[in-house]
Amino acid sequence: MQCFNCGAQLGEGQACPGCGVNVKMYKKLLAISNYLYNTGLERAKVRDLSGAVDALKKSLQYNKNNIEARNLLGLVYYETGETVSALSEWVISKNQRGQDNIAAQYLDDVQSHPAMLNTVNQTIKKYNQALLYCQQDSTDLAVIQLKKILSSNPKLVKAHQLLALLYIRDRKYDLARKSLRTAGQIDRSNTITMRYLAEIDTLTAAGEEKEVRKKKKDSRVEFSSGNETIIQPANLRDNSGWMMIVNILVGLVIGVTATYFLIVPSIRQNLQKSANTAVSEANDVVASKNQEIQSLQEEVAKLEKGIEKAQGEQTASQTKADGYRELLEAYQTYQQGGLEDAKAALAKIDGAKLDAASKQLYDAMQGDINTKYLETTYNEGHSAYMSRQYQTSAELLQKVVDIDDTYSNGDAIYYLAQSYRIIGEYEKAAELYQKVIEDYPSSYKANNAKNNYLPEVQARLGTTQQ
């Protein structure tokens, strides 16, 4: 244990042997931090991950340099699917102690798998999208998104909890309980998981109690006899012989009377009533089906809209990625010194579709490439001219003039005119000589063009046309 003030090794006393500062409270804080670390370790061993996170956070509050507590906190985060939080803790740990720190190995293991990092990135985006769907009341899309998340990252506890919450909202208690049990297997003492399970138990218990009350009420009959209320089973029957005979005789009398006075006249009325009831029920069924069809059509339209939006975002992302890839290829070619290839690669890139940083690099590369390209091409063209390779000189200098017809204070256009004159391209030579005279009237190039070369090529043009 080292002194916080001077870094000296502390002994058993309450004062630092190096600087004499009182370290009693400092030792007490370190002891509390170590105790909380041990508590977090014990909780992590029994998969009480939420409790472990609380204990380890408190341990770091007492001693932010407790490397073991920070590394364990990262492991607990990683076990619950919180990879980003785990990486943050390990990066802090590595910065605090660069040597003999297992956090460096954890970081290397994660960063050496780009596919894993990409999965983590996609998981974060999909979870945020699921939250957005919940805010927009698009619960079906949110459920689909959460299932995709859990298929790639099954340890993400908060995704299990959010999926269970959506199932509770839709009264799918069995599916909600299944999701929460899965979350409980990862983190046994998570308070949110236990609260949701308790809520499901409350809701299901209320429904079962109503069902029991209904069955109990249907299983008995209550009637009054004087001032007393008599309760008897609904299926109670009087099985005495004489009572059965009386009931039969009374039934026969009532039946004959009803047949002559009630049943026959009411048959037609009952038939008509039954027909009307059947028609009404059929209309209700048709209306219900139409409503279901409309709801399904609206849901399909919503899903199609979501698919179109996702496809548009995918296309935009692909276009941007292609632009970055082409820019990278052009940069690599530029670094290798291939000006022609780099210039051709840049020509394929639409600079308007790049972001600010990429556009800045694109403009800088284009300006530098053009400058070097003009310089190299002009020097090669001028050397070819001086070597009397006039056809080659004309081709090279024409490339320079196409980009900048003022290059080298008009020398490029002047030597291009000379090359065209010598190889017999008189019309091009005459046009270029005229431009030299107009743009550089006081130069020796304009004087030579006006007094010597322009009249010569015009004379040759006249002879050719005759």
Image (tube, rainbow, N blue to C red):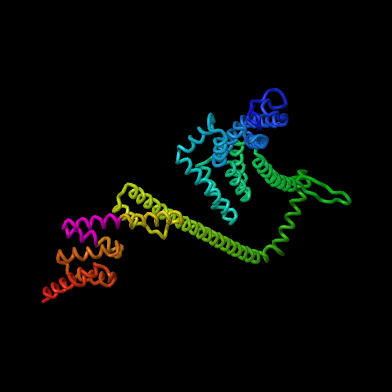
Q: Determine if the magenta segment contains residue 375.
A: yes
Q: Residue at x 17, y 69 (%)?
A: 426
367 left or right of 26 in image = left
Q: Residue at x 51, y 33 (%)?
A: 104
Q: Residue at x 45, y 57 (%)?
A: 312
Q: Residue at x 28, y 63 (%)?
A: 402
314 left or right of 287 in image = left
**Quadrant location, the N terminus:** top right
Residue 224 or residue 324, whichever sits in front: 324
**Quadrant location, the C terminus:** bottom left
Looking at the magenta stretch, what is its main secondary structure?
helix
x, y percentage for residue 381? 23, 57
x, y percentage for residue 57? 65, 37
x, y percentage for residue 115? 45, 41
Residues shaded magenta: 373-397
Instruction: Say if residue 230 shows up in the picture.
Output: yes
Image height check: is 377 above or below 237?
A: below
267 left or right of 457 in image = right
Instruction: Say if residue 315 shows up in the picture.
Output: no
**In the figure, residue 253 lies in which quadrant?**
bottom right
x, y percentage for residue 76? 59, 35
Q: Determine if the magenta segment contains residue 3.
A: no
